[in-house]
Amino acid sequence: MSRSLSMHGTAKKNSKMKRWMKLLFRSKTGTVGLFIVVSIVLVAILAPWLAPHEPQTIDPVNTHKPPMWMEGGDRSNILGTDNLGRDILSRIIYGSQVSLLVGISSVVLAGVIGVLVGLFTGYFGGFLDTFFMRLADSFLAIPNILLALVMLGVFGPGLLTLILVLGVTNWVQYARIIRSEVLSIKERDFIRAAKSIGVKHRHIIFSHLYPNVISSFIVVATLSVASTIILESSLSFLGLGIQPPQVSWGTILSDGRDYLATSWWLATFPGLAITISVLGIIFLGDWLRDILDPRTVK
Amino acid sequence: MSQNPLLEVRGLKKSFDVTKGFLKKEKHYLYAVNDVSFTLKKGEVLGIVGESGCGKSTLGNLIVHLHEPTAGEILFEGISLLDLPAEQLRRRRADIQIIFQDPFSSLNPRKRVFDIIAEPLRTHLALSKAELKQDVLHLMELVGLNRSYLYRYPHEFSGGQRQRVGIARAIALRPKLIICDEPVSALDVSIQSQILNLLKKLQKELQLTYLFIAHGLPAVKHVSDRIAVMYLGKIVELTTKEKLFMNPMHPYTEGLLSAIPIPDPTERKEQRKLLEGDIPDPVNPPAGCKFHPRCPYKTEICSRIEPEFTEKEVGHFVACHHPLGKENKE
Amino acid sequence: MEHALLTVNRLKTYFYTEDGVVPAVDDVSFAIKKGEVVAIVGESGSGKSVTSLSVMRLIENPGKIAGGEILFEGRNLVDISLKKMRELRGNQLAMIFQEPLTSLNPVFTIGNQLAESIRLHQKKNKKEAIKIGIEMLEKVGIARANQVYDQYPHALSGGMQQRVMIAMALSCNPKLLIADEPTTALDVTIQAQILRLMKDLIEEFGTSILLITHDLGVVAEMADQVIVMYGGQVVEQADVFTLFKEPKHPYTKGLIDSTPKIHEWKEELNSIPGTVPGPFEFPEGCKFADRCPFVMDKCKAESPPVIEIGKGHVVRCWLHGEKGLKLNESKSFT
């Protein structure tokens, strides 16, 4: 059932947009976050046109070329080249495609599983709860990376499996957070009011509980986009993640690790890319949490 | 007056498990409601009064079926709600509604007033959007809320206005019975009487039946026809409000009445008798009459034998070995 | 004129929030004599609690005492150092709160906390502190004080916890006890016990009490002087008998009328229309104007001054004209 009345539909939509915009521009970090995220998404989409070189092209003559502003660098490779003479900037631009895709979609996947499990186990309790929480415990008992390794080993490496594996291994943290939120919210009187009205369980879960727990999810989720991007790089480093010639920030970072002492730019720039985009996502997440709470605007 | 009672409660019990001890786990039972029986006629208001731990709120929750009783029966229009299949029970819920104590926790902070009041209508009736809006506006008018509040969120309101939203939600389906669970105790003094007047007005206009729960006698006095006084899970006295205030028979009722501070400095109660002692731990209630450790009139029998809840005068039920009044008269 | 123990003079406590300045306490003056019980009555948002916290200098950011003075035995509490203030608190000035459980530390025994405060303020050794502690528990009517001394706060009922709080507050023999809704969280039979206890203790110790409450029944039972607050301002002040007999401010009248009375049978309860406005929603002029049944044009335009209409009976209302002494201008009144 729609939340708004048709006669008020358009007016309300407008006012909602206005409210969001007002909130966005009132919060400086929100504006910055949105700017960063939009830029990175655009870079990812427009990679073939933006990148000055092909990311895989090897240039044995120009290996370890420093960035243009350093001695020995020049304008053809703005951020320098790596040990095989590949252009770092182009690799970072192309790498944004995979990193964003893996980082965001695996968090979304883990989030959907975790939020659903958390909502249902917290609300119904009983056997369902015991079962999933013991399952969650066993997930926690095994290090994520080990679990991911085993699963990737079984299913074979690749982009899609990587997303699936990261999604499936990370649901536990969301499930636990959402469940504990649900446990406290379901004792509030408005949930009891809904029950006493005879509202169906499904409706209570999605219409009453969900809007009240989603902000905690957003906070945790935006923070874990970062760790997922790093986890992807570790897996790729072990040869179980992204397979060449595909490139991600994680793979560039781990490729560059060996040369940190001699050619620092190999690892620094992809690291910087990760940091900036993660900050952008966190800022955006904060803003999202605010607009989802009616209390923040009068 | 009338045929069958709207609500009949027979021997209702509800116990909760309380586990004590860290290494040596001992299971204890807390009887929040312990063998409670009463009937409620259509159009009547029964006040339930008692201090913390007396089980009054649990009783309310049992009748709305937010808890499963441990034993006993709840007959609503002659039908046992406990025996109904889930889907029928869900439909029946439209007939019994509840108004909560805390207006800050009883409204979903993420929903607008319109959605809060419309929820029961959406759940049980298939209305068009225009009808729904019209109904909600009508309800808002009934409870004295300005139409312009329709799309506001709960946090924009004061406690009294929130409570009005809660009342509108409760009467939306024209229920036959409303449980008022301490509806004014969280409100400011000047607002309490507004809400009490509103509840009484609605009760008359819509011919509602209330089970009105409160921790103090002053709050129930205005709306109730009869009043039941609870102590440690049991009803100790049940009669019309006039009899209860003029001629209380149970020593606990007398104590409750004399403890109420009177807003008149010329009537300070230096000489008045006050109840001694604390409310006992409900997990380890005293033997015999549960009130005897605090009772100024106790005798030897009170600590051994639990008094029966019987009709001592017409329409005046008391559970006491030495009911007051009678002895004075004789 | 008898010397007052505490004189609050044109106190202003403002909260500087993001949305603007909230005058939580706006030009409040009163005095407490030795052995006197002064009650501040008001609803939520009236500023009654902020007034008491200001006296204790317990106002936290973004709140600030923006003006006025709080004279305690001649010393201005607004100006003295926080170190001096800490010495006064718990020693000369003590406070009890509505929720006793939140004011007691759950991980220490009752005795532990009681003895600590006695040792801190009275410089007694451990043995003496224990002895005084147990004596205090007995004084506040706790049976088996020896056992309770070794118990943890959660093991006690609400009434017992409040007794412990009172014992702690009185253990250092303070001159002024500030009680912020001390019985609101308690059951009515327990409330009656605690009120009686407080009365007995005033007599025994000669402590002055500043009682903060919303319940006129409690006021009638306990107070000598009553201050009625609304929207951060004192709207009426009088001795308790005068106030209940001849309330002059419409708000005071409304409060008294809407307090349920046990032996009154009415079809409809009296009430004050409207709701208590939020911090930014008070009207211009008189703050009570939009709820007042006697409102005049003047009330909406101009804030009424505080005038004295009888001995020690002051009211802030245009209904009583501009005659009488304008207390806004006078330095203090006791």
Image: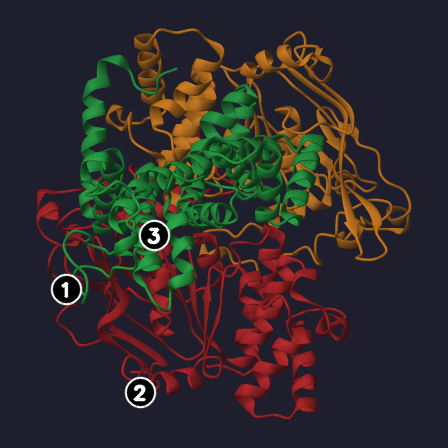
Q: Nearer the viewer, residue B115 or C273?
A: B115
Which secondary structure, mark 1? loop
Chain assignment, label 3: A
The reply to whether the C-beta atoms of the residues labelled 3 and 2 are less than 8 Å apart is: no
Q: Which residue is mark 1?
A: C324
**Separation of marks 3 and 1 at Cα, in angstroms:** 96 Å
Does A70 appear above or below C283? below
Does B120 appear above or below C308? above
Q: How would you rate the neighbour count of disc 2 (Cα within 10 Å): few for under 14, some for 14-19, many for 20 or more?
A: few
Q: Which mark lies nearer to you, 2 or 1?
A: 2
Instruction: Identify the colour of chain A in the image.
Output: green
Most extreme residue toward the front is A61
Q: For the point 54% across and 36% down, which residue is it?
A: A165
Res C110 quadrant in image: bottom right
Q: Which residue is mark 3?
A: A84
Which secondary structure, mark 3? loop
**Separation of marks 2 and 1 at Cα, in angstroms:** 28 Å
The lab-note entry on whether marks 3 and 2 share a chain reads no
Instruction: Identify the colour of chain B in the image.
Output: orange
- Which label is found at residue C80? none
